[in-house]
Image: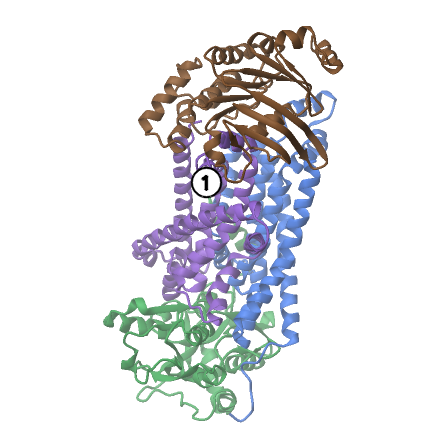
């Protein structure tokens, strides 16, 4: 039944809509760039005191829109929505600290890395966790659908501690959970640790996670190579113009990471 | 023996019973007649403590019904009551209806309670309806079930509150026959009733109530044939 | 950090208006979905009554699906399905579509119950007075059946209004999502949840009270 | 056709896990209902029979449970109570939240049920010498249960549907598990479509079982 309706509807649509151009043309035609941004990931994406989107990723989205000479439309997404929103075509691009894993690359397309993160814990002040090994037997939290979650679950499985893991809908719920004592340590990224521990009196900086650095990319439609090319160019221009240094410095601080993997030529 | 002295009952401003004095001896059958609203039913409710009273005493075998120290639940086991609405328990079969109270109130064994139930149901002529639910019984049958249920507690007194007035006319007879049977067996009974024939034939005494006052009491011949009070005369003239 | 940027800030008076505005959005999405859904539901209910088994088999079983699958699943499914067939609906649009169908599914049952609550002799009586089928439907069935199922309909209305909170899953900033945003920023879950609860209560309670009053008046 | 390519293989691979999670959903719903029925019964009696703080307590419970969204209630038992230093694991949050909600709705059903049992049943039982407790447990409540049997069945279905909100608080019942898998494979539509079918089957099973049970329980 549903299938017939689907077929009928799509047939009708095929008859009325012209053959689709690529995303680049679509965005320019539409005059609007639809950016998916994760807004509970300070300082990369958050809401300011008047509840408007702000942060490193938000500014990147606005820069891209400016380059395209269109309006930027920010679509707030959760971690787990970042890729489906591209796969189903509801957004043109996602700035969401998305690690460029090969598994994900089966579903969506990635630009060259535009930011690099390390996984790091935030710990409840009542809990003693100084090294990664101290995490044995502790209750761990992370946001659903993130790389930290998947990496941690691998280790937790080895340690036989999967039961001690709890996932939350957003990074902020993770922080809230750790500060309230629902979990002993929450895994997030190094950039978030400083503002978070500054905000919560009951949170302190935790150890770095042993897995490799997170190379994160802008996400676009997998098949749309011209669009991905454009995004690559955008990333290099942001670095060349010094905008990357400026924004990273503004939101995160010094030690701007170099966006290059030693021994690899992009 | 039931002894009632100077019984007063108010519902708010309404003075329903105005100083009733009455004695009912063991083995006696008393019929209470009167127009509706005269306080007849309230009298029964006060006797088994379903209603509180404001003044006077009600004593059953010397025990004050309304005294704080009295265990009403225990006392009520002496008093069987049958209502105008038959009030059979719809979720239980006829047997279970009758057996429930002996089992949980008197603590009889299940087998014993069921035996009592069967005996009492046969007694009231429902031997073929043991496993039926009330919804499958007629009004008359349900009222006989209610009588059996009361009898199963082996009461010493039976109170009937207009037991036949909610029944279809053709069902009235079967219930009256059952009541007549009980009277013949020597049960002490107080029957609030509109059935003048029953009151005349079965009762030892008849009481006429008018506006909360017991106007007249005496043997049926006296009340029906030579009523003293003008109210009684008028009431009986209307009923006939 | 070169500039001072605050990622978190306390709860301010402007946040109260942010919540109030979100409450209005909850009200708006509910009113829209409930009104359209009710009209559709009444039509479906009438079809279910008149169409007997054929209608039960077709629209009946489709509407049944919407009553047997969690609303949150329906929302996620539709939100992800719509773009595949080229319908680019925002969270609000997707929310309205699903809430409307969901309301219609619930109301169709209520409406059919209402039609069946009108005794057949009464309808026959109106027809013998010379009323047409439609006159009978509008002047007899609607007022009598409507009265009978009014409480049930109010139940649906209140249910849908509260269920509209689930549209937050799609990112529509209604009351619950707004409170989540504020919790994220201010880290004061207790205060903000209490406020959001008070807003919901203020939307729902008067309606249920009002309906109860109506019921009492009709019962007399 | 569409630009979206369906991938069903990952879903089929995790079907055993999903069915396992379906059992968890059922477990949570049944436990919440049992608690909800017990508390709901108490609340109904408190509301009808008592005065003073206990009545006030029952009324506020009932009205808050009925006039705020379940998701809100879950958030409250999660992060709201967390702010007060009470940290419940997700399993307890969902059972507490659903029990709280069900108790509120069932209390009103029970109240209606008690009002539908004639007072005279009470008198009849008391005249047989039964005390208050015996009258309630043997005579009144069995009859009330028949009257509220259908509403309880409906509430059970609601409990199953509402338990899907577990995914919002990180509890991996059927919806949570689905979301967890979907977030790893990005096959949201496929996963949720299969889950919708599982919910539909669970709901139909409950309704069928309830019908069988009522035929056995209520022979009068």
- The chain displayed purple equals D
Q: Nearer the viewer, residue A265 or C126?
A: C126
Q: Which residue is painted at 24% across and 72% down in the image? A: A159
Q: Which residue is painted at 30% across and 88% down in the image? A: A263
Mark 1 neighbour density, 10 Å: few (under 14) some (14–19) many (20 or more): few
Compared across the picture, whether D82 is left or right of C130 comes to: left
Query: In the rendered picture, chain C carries what hue?
Result: blue
Q: Which residue is painted at 43% across and 81% down in the image? A: A203
Q: Taking the image as drawn, is residue C105 in sight?
A: no
Above-or-below relation of B32 to C202? above
Q: Which residue is mark 1?
A: D133
**Is label 1 in a helix, a strand or a loop?**
helix
Q: Nearer the viewer, residue B228 or A178?
A: B228
Q: Position of residue B81 (x, y in %)?
A: 52, 24
Compared across the picture, whether D27 is left or right of B147 comes to: left
Q: How is the image coloured?
A: by chain
User: Looking at the image, how many numbered discs can be counted on the residues?
Assistant: 1
Q: Position of residue B184 (x, y in %)?
A: 48, 10
Q: Nearer the viewer, residue C92 or C112?
A: C112
Compared across the picture, whether A58 is left or right of A101 comes to: right
Q: Position of residue B73 (x, y in %)?
A: 47, 34
Q: Position of residue A133 (x, y in %)?
A: 27, 81
Q: Taking the image as drawn, is residue B121 in sight?
A: yes
Query: In the rendered picture, chain A carries what hue?
Result: green
Disc 1 is attached to a residue of which chain?
Answer: D
Query: In the rendered picture, chain B carries what hue?
Result: brown
- Can you say which quadrant of the picture contains the C terminus of chain D? top left
């Amino acid at each position: 039944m549903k299938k017939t309706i689907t077929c009928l509807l799509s047939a009708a649509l095929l008859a009325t809509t012209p053959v689709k151009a690529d995303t680049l043309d679509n965005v320019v035609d539409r005059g609007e760039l639809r950016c998916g941004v994760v807004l509970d990931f300070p300082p990369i994406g958050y809401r300011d005191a008047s509840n408007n989107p702000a942060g490193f990723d938000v500014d990147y989205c606005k820069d891209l829109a400016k380059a395209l000479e269109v309006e930027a439309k920010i679509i707030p997404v959760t971690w787990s929505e970042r890729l489906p929103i591209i796969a189903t075509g509801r957004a043109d691009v996602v700035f969401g600290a998305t690690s460029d894993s090969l598994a994900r690359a089966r579903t969506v397309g990635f630009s060259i890395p535009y930011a690099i993160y390390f996984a790091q814990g935030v710990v409840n002040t009542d809990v003693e966790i100084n090294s990664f090994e101290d995490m044995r037997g502790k209750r761990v939290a992370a946001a659903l659908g993130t790389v930290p979650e998947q990496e941690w679950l691998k280790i937790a499985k080895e340690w036989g501690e999967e039961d001690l893991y709890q996932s939350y809908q957003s990074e902020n719920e993770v922080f809230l959970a750790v500060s309230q004592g629902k979990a002993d340590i929450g895994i997030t990224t190094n950039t978030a640790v400083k503002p978070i521990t500054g905000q919560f009196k009951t949170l302190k900086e935790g150890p770095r996670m042993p897995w490799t650095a997170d190379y994160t990319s802008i996400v676009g439609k997998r098949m749309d190579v011209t669009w991905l090319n454009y995004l690559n160019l955008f990333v290099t221009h942001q670095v060349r113009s010094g905008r990357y240094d400026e924004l990273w410095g503004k939101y995160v601080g010094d030690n701007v990471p170099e966006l290059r993997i030693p021994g690899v030529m992009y | 023996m039931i002894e009632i002295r100077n019984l007063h009952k108010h519902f708010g401003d309404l003075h329903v019973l105005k100083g009733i004095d009455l004695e009912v001896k063991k083995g006696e059958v008393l019929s209470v007649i009167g127009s509706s609203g005269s306080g007849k039913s309230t009298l029964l409710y006060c006797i088994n403590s379903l209603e509180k009273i404001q003044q006077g005493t009600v004593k059953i075998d010397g025990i004050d019904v309304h005294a704080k120290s009295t265990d009403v639940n225990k006392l009520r086991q002496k008093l069987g009551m049958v209502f105008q609405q038959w009030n059979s328990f719809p979720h239980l079969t006829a047997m279970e209806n009758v057996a429930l109270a002996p089992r949980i109130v008197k603590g009889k064994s299940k087998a014993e309670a069921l035996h009592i139930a069967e005996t009492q149901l046969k007694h009231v002529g429902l031997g073929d309806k043991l496993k039926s639910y009330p919804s499958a019984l007629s009004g008359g049958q349900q009222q006989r079930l209610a009588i059996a249920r009361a009898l199963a507690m082996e009461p010493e007194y039976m109170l009937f509150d207009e037991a036949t007035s909610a029944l279809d006319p053709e069902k009235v007879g079967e219930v009256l026959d059952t009541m007549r049977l009980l009277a013949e067996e020597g049960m002490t009974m107080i029957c609030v009733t509109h059935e003048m024939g029953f009151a005349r034939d079965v009762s030892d005494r008849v009481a006429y109530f008018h506006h909360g006052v017991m106007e007249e009491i005496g043997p049926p011949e006296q009340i029906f044939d030579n009523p003293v009070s003008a109210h009684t005369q008028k009431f009986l003239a209307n009923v006939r | 950090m070169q500039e001072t940027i605050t990622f978190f800030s306390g709860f301010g008076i402007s946040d109260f208006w942010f919540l109030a505005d979100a409450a209005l959005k909850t009200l708006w999405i509910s009113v829209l979905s409930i009104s359209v859904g009710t009209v559709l539901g009444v039509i479906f209910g009438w079809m279910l009554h008149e169409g007997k088994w054929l209608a039960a088999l077709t629209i009946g079983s489709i509407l049944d699906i919407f009553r047997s699958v969690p609303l949150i699943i329906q929302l996620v499914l539709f939100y992800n399905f719509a773009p595949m067939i080229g319908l680019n609906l925002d969270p609000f649009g997707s929310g309205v579509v699903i809430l409307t169908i969901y309301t219609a599914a619930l109301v169709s049952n209520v409406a059919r119950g209402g039609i069946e609550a009108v005794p057949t002799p009464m309808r026959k009586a109106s027809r013998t007075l010379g009323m047409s089928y439609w006159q009978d439907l509008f002047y007899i069935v609607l007022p009598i059946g409507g009265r009978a199922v009014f409480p049930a309909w109010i139940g649906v209305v209140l249910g849908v209004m509260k269920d509209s909170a689930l549209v937050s899953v799609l990112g529509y900033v209604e009351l619950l999502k707004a409170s989540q945003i504020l919790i994220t920023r201010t880290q004061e879950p207790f205060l903000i949840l209490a406020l959001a609860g008070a807003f919901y209560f203020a939307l729902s309670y008067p309606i249920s009270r009002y309906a109860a009053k109506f019921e009492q008046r009709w019962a007399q | 056709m569409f630009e979206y390519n369906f991938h069903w293989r990952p879903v089929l691979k995790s079907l055993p896990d999903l069915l396992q999670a379906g059992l968890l959903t059922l477990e949570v719903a049944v436990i919440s209902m049992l608690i909800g029925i017990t508390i709901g019964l108490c609340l109904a009696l408190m509301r009808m029979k008592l005065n003073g703080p206990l009545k006030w307590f029952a009324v506020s419970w009932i009205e808050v449970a009925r006039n705020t969204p379940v998701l809100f209630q879950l958030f409250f038992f999660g992060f709201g109570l967390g702010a007060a230093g009470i940290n419940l694991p997700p399993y307890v949050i969902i059972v507490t939240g659903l029990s709280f909600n069900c108790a509120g709705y069932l209390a009103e059903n029970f109240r209606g049920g008690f009002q539908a049992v004639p007072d005279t049943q009470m008198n009849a039982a008391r005249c047989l010498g039964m005390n208050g407790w015996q009258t309630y447990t043997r005579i009144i409540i069995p009859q009330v249960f028949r009257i509220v049997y259908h509403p309880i069945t409906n509430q059970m279905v609601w409990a199953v549907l509402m338990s899907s909100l577990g995914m919002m608080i990180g509890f991996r019942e059927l919806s949570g598990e689905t979301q967890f898998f979907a977030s790893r494979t990005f096959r949201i539509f496929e996963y949720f479509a299969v889950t919708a079918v599982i919910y539909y089957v669970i709901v139909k099973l409950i309704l069928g079982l309830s019908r069988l049970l009522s035929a056995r329980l209520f022979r009068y």
